Image (cartoon, rainbow, N blue to C red):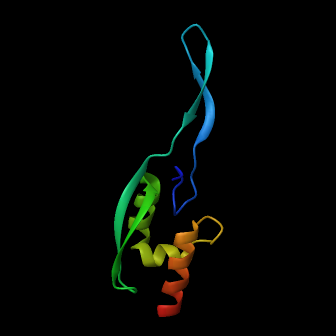
């Protein structure tokens, strides 16, 4: 199970933890992922995705999962989200 947002493609970043004495230790910065249930009006079912908090706010701003998937480039989306996008375009 990857720590990657299924809608925006955000993944962990590498960096350093820097102490007060300026000692550097390697660490990872993880995206703020949540398991969220979206309701698709076009497919008439609930969909569970692992998304970042920023993606959740964007979906809410765009007016729902259906509108977000229609207007997003497929390169950002996960394989599951691409399949959902294709199903939504077929149904609409």
Q: How many marks?
A: 0
In the current view of this chain or complex, which residue is farthest to the right?
75
In the current view of this chain or complex, which residue is farthest to the top?
21
Task: Name which quarter of the figure residue 79 lies in.
Answer: bottom right
Give the residue drawn at x 37%, y 57%: 35
Residue 88: give x, y in percent of width and height: 48, 85
Is residue 24 in view? yes
In the current view of this chain or complex, which residue is farthest to the bottom?
91
Q: Is residue 55 above or below residue 38?
A: above
Residue 18: give x, y in percent of width and height: 58, 18
Give the residue drawn at x 51%, y 41%: 30
In the current view of this chain or complex, which residue is farthest to the front?
1
Give the residue drawn at x 42%, y 64%: 49
Task: Name which quarter of the figure residue 36 lies in.
Answer: bottom left
- Identify which residue, 46 or 76, lies in the foreground: 46
Residue 34: give x, y in percent of width and height: 39, 53
Task: Name which quarter of the figure residue 13 lies in.
Answer: top right
Is residue 92 in view? no
Give the residue drawn at x 55%, y 60%: 8
Residue 92: give x, y in percent of width and height: 47, 92
């Amino acid at each position: 199970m990857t720590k990657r947002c299924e809608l925006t493609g955000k993944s962990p970043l590498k960096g350093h933890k820097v102490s007060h004495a300026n000692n550097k230790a390697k660490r990872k910065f993880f995206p703020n992922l949540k398991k969220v249930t979206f309701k698709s009006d076009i497919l008439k079912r609930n969909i569970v995705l692992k998304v970042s908090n920023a993606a959740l706010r964007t979906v809410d701003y765009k007016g729902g999962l259906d509108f977000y998937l229609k207007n997003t480039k497929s390169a950002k989306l996960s394989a599951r989200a691409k399949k959902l996008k294709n199903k939504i375009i077929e149904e609409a």
